[in-house]
Image (cartoon, helix red, strand yellow):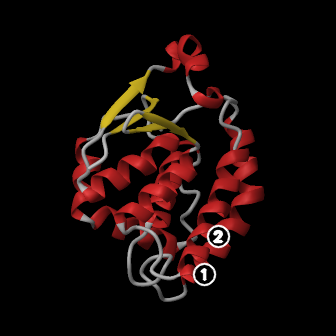
């Protein structure tokens, strides 16, 4: 089995999707957490000056979604067909568009709410519609897209409580993810952080 070392900040954010995959597959890994205040001293030592990174058998890889896609394929959390994988990537890319442009660095919650009011309905409405009568985004089985949605929900809900209340199917996916024993156990034991 490969040796894994995940390095990220001391919060959920873009590292949490990998932690979910490791929890789901009961894969041992080192969870290295850098305090945000210490980041400037470390930044130059990481590829592209960004986190998270995953070290696999001593080789460091960057870009959270690329790493997560790799881990998902290795662990059975990818699609069962190429079309399922396409659908999973569509879900993740739409959510990531919402994440990437969210005004994380502002202290202005009104600005954050304005952003979500303008951009979230198209994304969330599209995802809600794409679920149809399915339990998960790929149908009747869980994939990393469902984990990514749960991670995104946590990040947005912290700043905009109730942002997804109008989307019961998306909330049901989140509930199903939390009912997976390995994920429930991880959520219970993970360090408590705001985001």
Question: For residue 130, which numbered disc appears in the image?
Answer: 1
Say which of 124 and 70 sits in front. 70
**Between discs 2 and 1, the one toward the N terminus:** 2
In the rendered image, residue 62, in percent from the top left (x then y), is placed at 56, 39
Q: Quadrant of residue 181?
A: bottom left
Is residue 161 in view from this perspective? no
In the rendered image, residue 114, in percent from the top left (x then y), is placed at 75, 48
Indicate the secondary structure of the residue bearing disc 2.
helix
- Disc 2, disc 1: CB below 8 Å? yes
Q: Which residue is mark 2?
A: 90
Farthest residue toward the bottom? Answer: 133
Is residue 140 in view from this perspective? yes
Residue plotted at (36% across, 52% down): 20
Residue plotted at (51% across, 20% down): 36
Mark 1: few, some, or many residues within 10 Å (few <14, many ≥20)? some
Image position of 124 with respect to 114: above or below: below
In the rendered image, residue 154, in percent from the top left (x then y), is placed at 47, 50
Image position of 44 with respect to 66: above or below: above
Indicate the secondary structure of the residue bearing disc 1.
helix
Q: Which is closer to the viewer, label 2 or label 1?
A: 2
Residue 119 shown left or right of residue 178 in the figure: right
In the rendered image, residue 48, in percent from the top left (x then y), is placed at 65, 30
Residue plotted at (64% across, 70% down): 90
């Amino acid at each position: 089995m490969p040796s894994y070392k995940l390095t990220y900040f001391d919060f959920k954010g873009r590292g949490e999707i990998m932690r979910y995959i490791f929890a789901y597959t009961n894969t041992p890994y080192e969870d290295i957490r850098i305090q945000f205040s210490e980041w400037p001293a470390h930044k130059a030592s990481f590829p592209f000056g960004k986190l998270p990174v995953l070290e696999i058998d001593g080789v460091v890889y960057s870009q959270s979604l690329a790493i997560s896609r790799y881990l998902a394929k290795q662990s059975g959390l990818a699609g069962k067909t190429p079309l399922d994988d396409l659908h999973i990537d569509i879900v993740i890319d739409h959510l990531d568009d919402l994440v990437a442009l969210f005004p994380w660095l502002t202290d202005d919650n009104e600005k954050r709410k304005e952003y979500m009011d303008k951009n979230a309905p198209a994304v969330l409405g599209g995802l809600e519609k794409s679920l149809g009568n399915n339990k998960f985004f790929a149908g009747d089985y869980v994939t990393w897209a469902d984990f990514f949605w749960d991670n995104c929900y946590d990040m947005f809900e912290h700043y905009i409580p109730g942002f997804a209340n109008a989307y019961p199917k998306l909330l049901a996916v989140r509930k199903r993810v939390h009912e997976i024993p390995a994920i429930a156990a991880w959520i219970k034991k993970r360090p408590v952080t705001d985001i």
